[in-house]
Image: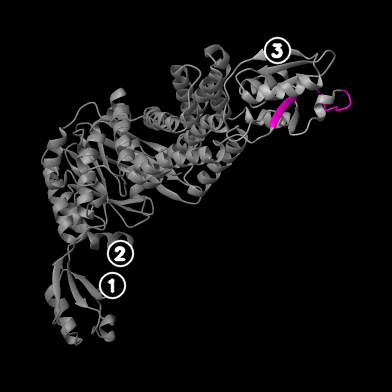
Amino acid sequence: MSTPILEVRDLIKQYPATTAVAGVSFAVAEGTCFGLLGPNGAGKTTTIEIMEGILPPTAGEVLYRGAPLGARFQEEAGILFQKTALQDFLTVRQCIGLFRGLYASGLDVEEIIRLCALEKLADRDSRKLSGGQQQRLLLAIALVHDPAVLFLDEPTTGLDPQARRNFWDLVQSIKARRKTIILTTHYMEEAELLCDEIAIMDKGRLVAQGPPRRLLNEHFAEVMLELPRQGFPPAARALDLNIIEGADRVEISTHDIEGTLRALMAADVPLAHLRIRPANLEDLFLELTGKELRP
Amino acid sequence: MIRRMLSVLHARNLEFLRDRGTMIFTLLLPVMVVVGMGFVFGGPERPLFKVGVLDTRIDKQAYPFLGEHYVEFIVEKDVNTAMRNLTHQQLDLLVDPHGPARYWVNTDAPKGYIVEKLLLAADPAAARQPVTGKAVRYVDWLFPGILGMNMMFSCLFGVGYVVLRYRKSGFLKRLHATPLTAFEFLSAQVLSRLALILFVTAILYFGIGAIIRFQVAGSGLLLAVVALLSALSMIALGLTIAARFSSEELVGGLLNLLTWPMMLLSGIWFSLEGSPRWVQWIAHVFPLTHAIDAARAVMLDGAGLVQIAPHLLYLGVTALVFLAFGAWSFRWRID
């Protein structure tokens, strides 16, 4: 196997009151999209910031192309933080130009503007952009030097569904250029769509790692039956079924759909709003940690 | 390195130039202060003669001239200070009453001519020693102080709050993820603010100079060097405050802690000559004191490089020390 582009070994980050990362190891192959998943406080932002060279680890190391992070990594890594403010009074084009000037080589400013669909916004004050436009600008800034590896820390949090889909399209076009992408996200749909491999974090540790489909196949032979919680009779809770109760719905995982449906009908459970779906990453996270993935 | 620094410098300059409110305020405040001072102090002198007496007290019995009416007699302990005040017509006459009395009179001063007649009426044997020198109005004396004060506020608050804002907003954290170094970033901030301050100071110097009809006695080039080193020292001082803190209250408090004593003790409004030695010692720790002393020496006395070299050296050394400390203690992100 060729040397991974990024390798994280036994990473630990301790703060006076808490251990944010408690011994994490994984490797990222070049040209893939790697997703770090977990709820708030799982340690994924701390992990990605150590990988970016922004935070020093308490113990462990991060290797880029087999060597510790250094000048080469800084020239070849593009970063989109969870929150970033830019300088006031600069236009979109000037913001991109500022960051382009910080690297020895890279893409032409106009090319980056085209790549991130910012043509119509190029002369607009960067403070007057919508959330989705702002994220596109920050992505453009992360791409100014044509990086080999791109870090995206919760890039679509807070965006409306349309803006999120537009952003995913952009990330897919970057993926098509054979860039390595490290992504943290709350959104399972995002991870399933973009990631070739995922690592699920909880309480500073990895609880699972692998390609999404393989992980789902490993953990779920069943399908999920969803019913509204309202109207689910109390007596049905005593049935010999694998029932998981959420805030507004009841989920039943089963590999015997017919048998489960017969048992529910026998218990007079109304089936008018029944949904049957395959297990997804959210179910996987629930299975592994007993928690909802979203905060 | 130069390319990265220029990129940050260019962006910072654009940011400032488009911030019209700050720009107008930076230009308008000192103009208003100086024009106001010109109105208050630039009018005709009060009809009172001032005579310096080289002695420890005014002894009317020993020297009857010291009992003249409508003359204010001022004890002068330091002959050099007294001579400079006479040259600038801040004294109309200087007298040494010991032994055969001697007096110095500024032959360019009309009031010196009149008060000399009074002296000779009381003591015809007093020995005359003429000096020359044009009058220095208070507004002329104040002018370098106002320029220095404006420079101090612009240096300390301008750089301090800008870097703090960048840190709090996460912009510094984002820059840290690029090959930009702390030294490059700080140098760009220093250069941007330096260019701005020199530009603004030049506008104020020529603009207000024309309003109050000020004429510089020394070299304009030397004055520019004084301005350059003064601004550099005070910008670097501002960076030491902004280098690592993230709280507006703390940074604001520290900047006030620096600016208020400098404003009161650096000789902007009144001369520190005659003040207690410890006050003068504290005053000479402040870069602004050296900036104003050097500027006054060039602007009012026509001093050359040699005379103001100690001030320039102090400003240059403090600039380097502050800059080195700022770069060493610099933090890109909130801890």
Q: Which residue is found at the position 27% from the left and 51% from the top?
A: A154
Dot 1 amino acid type = Gly
Chain bearing tag 3 is B
Q: Is residue B42 above or below residue A229?
A: above
Q: Nearer the viewer, mark 2 or mark 3?
A: 3
Dot 2 amino acid type = Glu
Q: Is residue B26 left or right of residue B49?
A: left
- Mark 2, secondary structure of its residue: loop
Are circles 1 and 2 on residues that touch, CB within 8 Å?
A: yes
Quarter holding residue A252 = bottom left
Q: Residue B330 location in percent, x, y?
A: 45, 34
- What separation in Å lies between label 1 and label 3 (alpha carbons)? 103 Å
- Mark 3, secondary structure of its residue: strand
Q: Is residue A253 above or below residue B298?
A: below
Q: Which residues are magenta?
A: B49-62
Q: Which residue is found at the position 17% from the left and 54% from the top?
A: A192
Chain bearing tag 1 is A
Q: Can you see residue A5?
A: no
- What separation in Å lies between label 1 and label 2 (alpha carbons)? 9 Å
Q: Nearer the viewer, residue B9 or B216?
A: B216
Q: Residues within 10 Å of mark 2 (few under 14, many from 20)?
A: some
Disc 1 marks which residue? Answer: A246
Q: Residue B323 location in percent, x, y?
A: 48, 27
- Secondary structure that dominates the magenta span: loop
Q: Which mark is residue A292?
A: 2
Q: Is residue B195 magenta?
A: no
Residue at the far right in the pictured view: B61
Q: Residues within 10 Å of mark 1 (few under 14, many from 20)?
A: few
